[in-house]
Image (cartoon, rainbow, N blue to C red):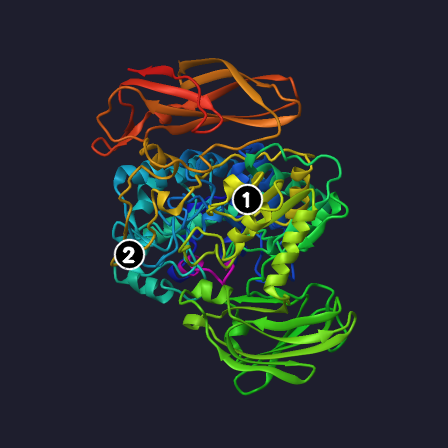
């Protein structure tokens, strides 16, 4: 039984209430013994639960990116992944997970595209609902974010998004409405403004979120997202993070005492916070937190391997895939050696193990050869666990915290070459950090040893100073500047097993004064003569039965904090694909990116497989798909253009601080459909190939009390077990008095069947699919007339129209 929350609130003084409404630290909420409230830990968590540390002292499972998870079109698997997230959270003492990200893919340039599910609001909402329900069933709160219209990163803390009411309701608010229907316990407000007011001070927090939809949970700010005191406190923002300092505190107490904010507004906020605590077992008198057993490493690996493979989308195949027998394979590209499992920013986690494409392919195809072909990008890979020992002989690296007077006031041991602090008091107090470790070389030959970080740095290798300079950020944005600091390194010639003493003294540069730093110690790749290495890759491909080229982006290209200026792959990758395809007509290209990229060579290769950012099991999942142990189960949930100039919604750059969503309802496939005589995408929404063939027959659509239902029989008419995703789209047949997309997604059914098996399906289409938001009536209404329902395997492969008449 839930305690009497209003009675508990009445026990608290004004100061106690205000204390509860600002975080106690970066990742914790304040406790209050007077009402039996325990402290609550929150953690980033869209693709894994990192916990309070920005390093790998406490590793986390690294799930596939949201674009990969969505591409599987499998709500049951989303629920299983939600249960894994809940178990990871509970193991780390986390009560609230900050995810899922349910902003839309308005423009393919969006920097956090990989972290959000889809360009379609209905599909985004359904996936989010499955995730939220499964996570919260285990007693861990979900936090759909970022409310609202935080669909790009440029000037994200100040941009004013200008969007009309109908577009806001039908597109950008719709996934959040579905999240509230699923019972979300927390919602995160975004940084940006919407129609003139910051999200944390916006009337949209009250209406529709709380008043219309009945959201009874907590609205938490994005970190440092509250920009004022009185307006945000009056606007239904409930909790300010991080703490304990912030724009509320003493200023909010003064505002209440001055009559600028009614204390009853604070009472409502505190009651919501106590309700959250009761739900997760952090309030005395409420049911205890549910016991959630930890998952074993093999169980985690099995689920993540399965999920990564099922999200991969095959968009071209001349029959080369799947690879049968034991072909001689050449594996080309830097991404094959160092695949990217995740994008950059607050979604990052630090897994205990990661499997590269080469790891998986080499095991699946004995005798495979590797050739990078291109010079590596300028980046540092942190020293791995086991490669480092402290001067005292323990595993890892010692970090000493030195105060202003030169005294050491603390020290920690980190297990690898990765170090991170976010709003950390020890970093704020430090005048200097001293890193001390001994690296044992894992191979013989020349290596570049160095670090990535910001500030006044001195690096010594075996006592010799190799770096001594002031290092400034490469970007103005706080997040991107810290997450992607410059690299400094020096080449040393080592023998395998040789030990090298590494000392780094760093006066950290803290952008904006925030105690936020990411430091790496590690190695950069040493590359031979570029022309010779390219020729070596070409020769390897010419001599192989099959060439597999892995290309893609990285967490320095796709990240929180900035948008992409181009959809083109990094320099040299397109040319590499073409050079390899010219000598091997069985060239398979694996595209390792979280968001759309251009593929100008697509018609010149045998097969193209989109892997997205597939998490820690990249290599094992990729090998399963290539050899046909499983199908590439993915279907597109965002549209990929053939050429950059074809993209219908490109702009993410504000003009005079304003970003106008002038395209209205027409984003994603809706925007492509608004140009029937325009360019054709290279990978349409909903499309994707498998290893078998399907037939859809016996279609029948009827009007139902809840909306409509379309039934059919889906038969696997090929020779292999497989998967099909049958999608239902609605369109208006009669002339309409309002602007509408050409068609819109309204339901789907995922079918898995053995060869020759027929599966009956029934897709329920909700009443909302036939309704639009009426600004005049401030309600959802259905325009009378005829609507068409069509089903198929993507917007470019739909069957006959089935007419539904709405009176």
Q: Residue at x 59, y 85 (%)?
A: 407
Q: Quadrant of the C terminus?
A: top left
Left or right position of 339 against 296 = left
What number is the disc on residue 98? none
Q: Nearer the viewer, residue 641 or 47?
A: 641
| Residue 158 picture quarter | bottom left
Q: Which residues are magenta?
A: 18-29
Mark 2 residue crowding within 10 angstroms, few (<14) / some (14–19) / many (20+)? some
Q: Is residue 20 magenta?
A: yes
Image coords of residue 367 (percent x, y): 76, 48
Residue at the spot of label 2: 231
226 in relation to 567, above or below: below
Left or right position of 381 against 12 = right
Total labels drawn: 2
Image coords of residue 110 (percent x, y): 41, 50
743 in relation to 599, above or below: above
């Amino acid at each position: 039984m839930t305690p009497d929350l209003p009675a508990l609130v009445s026990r608290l003084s004004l100061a106690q209430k205000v204390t509860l409404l600002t975080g106690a630290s970066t990742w914790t909420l304040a406790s209050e013994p007077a009402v039996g409230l325990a402290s609550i830990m929150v953690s980033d968590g869209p693709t894994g639960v990192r916990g309070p540390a920005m390093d790998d002292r406490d590793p986390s499972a690294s799930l596939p990116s949201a674009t990969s998870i969505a591409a599987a079109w499998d709500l049951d698997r989303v629920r299983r992944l939600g249960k894994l997230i809940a178990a990871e959270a509970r193991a780390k003492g986390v009560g609230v997970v900050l995810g899922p990200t349910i902003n839309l893919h308005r423009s393919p340039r969006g920097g956090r595209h990989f972290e959000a599910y889809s360009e379609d609001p209905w599909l985004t909402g359904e996936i989010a609902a499955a995730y939220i329900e499964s996570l919260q069933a285990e007693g861990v709160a979900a936090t759909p974010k970022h409310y609202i219209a935080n669909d790009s990163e440029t000037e994200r803390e100040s941009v004013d998004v200008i969007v009309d009411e109908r577009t806001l309701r039908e597109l950008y608010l719709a996934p959040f409405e579905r999240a509230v229907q699923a019972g979300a316990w927390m919602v995160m407000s975004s940084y940006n403004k919407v129609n003139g007011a910051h999200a944390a001070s916006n009337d949209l927090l009250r209406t529709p979120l709380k008043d219309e939809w009945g959201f009874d949970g907590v609205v938490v700010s994005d970190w440092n997202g509250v920009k004022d005191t009185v307006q945000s406190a009056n606007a239904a923002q409930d909790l300010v993070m991080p703490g304990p300092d912030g724009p509320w505190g003493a200023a909010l107490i003064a505002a209440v005492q001055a009559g600028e904010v009614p204390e009853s507004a604070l009472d409502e906020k505190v009651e919501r916070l106590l309700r959250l605590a009761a739900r997760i077992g952090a309030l005395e008198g409420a049911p205890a937190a549910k016991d959630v057993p930890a998952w074993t490493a093999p169980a985690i690996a099995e689920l993540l391997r399965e999920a990564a493979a099922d999200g991969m989308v095959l968009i071209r195949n001349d029959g080369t895939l799947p690879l049968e027998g034991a072909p001689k394979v050449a594996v080309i590209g830097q991404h094959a050696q160092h695949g990217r499992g995740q994008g950059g920013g607050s979604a990052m986690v630090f897994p205990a193990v990661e499997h590269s494409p080469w790891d998986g392919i080499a095991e699946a195809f004995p005798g495979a050869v590797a050739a990078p072909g291109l010079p590596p990008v300028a980046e540092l890979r942190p020293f791995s666990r086991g490669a480092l020992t402290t001067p005292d002989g323990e595993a890892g690296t010692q970090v000493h915290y030195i105060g202003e007077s030169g005294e050491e006031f603390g020290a920690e041991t980190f297990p690898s070459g990765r170090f991170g602090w976010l709003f950390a008091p020890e970093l704020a107090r430090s005048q200097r950090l001293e890193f001390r470790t001994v690296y044992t070389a894992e191979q013989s030959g020349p290596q570049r040893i160095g670090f990535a970080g910001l500030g006044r740095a001195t690096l010594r290798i075996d006592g010799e100073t190799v770096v001594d300079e002031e290092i400034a950020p490469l970007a103005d944005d706080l997040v991107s500047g810290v997450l992607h600091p410059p690299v400094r390194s020096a080449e040393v010639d080592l023998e395998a097993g040789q030990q090298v003493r590494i000392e780094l003294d760093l006066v950290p540069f803290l952008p904006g004064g925030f105690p936020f730093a990411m430091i790496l110690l590690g190695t950069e790749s040493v590359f031979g003569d570029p022309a010779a290495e390219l020729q070596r890759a070409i020769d390897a491909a010419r001599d192989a039965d099959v060439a597999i080229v892995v290309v893609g982006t990285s967490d320095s290209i796709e990240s929180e904090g900035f948008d992409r200026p181009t959809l083109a792959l990094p320099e040299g990758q397109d040319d590499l694909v073409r050079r390899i395809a010219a000598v091997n007509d069985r060239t398979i290209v694996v595209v390792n990116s979280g968001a759309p990229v251009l593929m100008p060579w697509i018609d010149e290769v045998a097969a193209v497989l989109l892997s997205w950012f597939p998490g820690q099991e990249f290599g094992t999942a990729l090998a399963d798909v290539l050899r046909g142990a499983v199908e590439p189960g993915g279907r597109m949930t965002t549209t990929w253009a053939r050429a950059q100039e074809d993209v219908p919604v490109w702009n993410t750059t504000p003009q005079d601080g304003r970003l106008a969503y002038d395209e209205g309802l027409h984003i994603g496939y809706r925007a492509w459909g608004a140009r029937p005589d325009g360019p054709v995408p290279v990978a349409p929404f909903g499309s994707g190939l498998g290893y078998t063939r399907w037939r859809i027959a016996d279609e029948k659509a009827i009007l139902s009390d809840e909306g409509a239902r379309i039934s059919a029989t889906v038969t696997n008419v090929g020779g292999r077990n497989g998967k099909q995703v049958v999608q239902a789209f609605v369109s208006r047949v009669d002339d309409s008095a309002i602007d509408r997309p050409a068609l819109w997604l309204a339901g789907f059914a995922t079918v898995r069947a053995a060869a020759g098996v027929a599966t009956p399906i029934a897709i329920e289409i909700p009443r909302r699919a036939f309704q639009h938001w009426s600004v005049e009536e401030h309600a959802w209404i259905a325009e009378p007339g005829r609507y068409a329902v069509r089903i198929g395997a993507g917007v470019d492969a739909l069957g006959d129209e089935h007419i539904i008449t709405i009176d």
